[in-house]
Image (cartoon, helix red, strand yellow):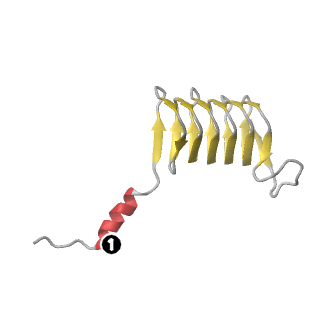
Amino acid sequence: MFPKKPATAARQVIDTMAGPTFSVFGADTTIKGDISATADLHIDGRVEGDIACAALVQGERSEIVGAIRAESARLAGTVRGTINAGELVILKTARIHGDLHYDTLTIEQGARVDGRLALRGSEAGAAPEGEARLMLAQ
């Protein structure tokens, strides 16, 4: 009775819906528990738990208490925990209390970091596999 739509048209709609997404947690949000996402995250509230995502953007008034694992992270608030990111940018308003593991690192003048800095993939006492890049932004 109804003509069938080609399977390719339906597949295109599904593929479009399954594309990259971006999730925002507002300033009035408090999350207690771990967050795992394939999407990019923007956090302006408070998180008490570990975060794993593709890319993380943290707002100035945000606080994260837990470990962070992301391919890229741009931090502007307070973090209390270990950070493991490919491309890590710490803005001047950030207050970091924990160890940093990174491929590339940028720290703006005025940021506070209380922890050890280490190139990802390197072991204590071993020569790093890649070249560490530390950039201090002015």
Q: Position of residue 83 (x, y in %)?
A: 68, 40
Report the front residue among 92 and 18.
18
Displayed quadrant of residue 94: top right
Left or right of residue 109, residue 24 in this image: left
Left or right of residue 45, residue 15 in this image: left
Q: Quadrant of the C terminus?
A: top right
Judged from this view, the residue extending furthest toward the left is 1
User: Quick one: label 1, few (<14), some, or many (20+) residues within 10 Å?
Assistant: few
Q: Position of residue 33 (x, y in %)?
A: 53, 35
Left or right of residue 57, residue 108 in this image: right
- Which residue: 52% across, 39% down? 42
Q: Position of residue 8 (x, y in %)?
A: 32, 72
- Which residue: 75% across, 50% down? 120
Q: Is residue 78 above or below residue 52?
A: above
Q: Is residue 42 above or below residue 10?
A: above
Q: Quickly name the residue at label 1.
A: 8
Judged from this view, the residue extending furthest toward the front is 33
Q: Position of residue 66 (x, y in %)?
A: 63, 34
Amino acid type, residue under disc 1 in the picture: Thr
Displayed quadrant of residue 82: top right
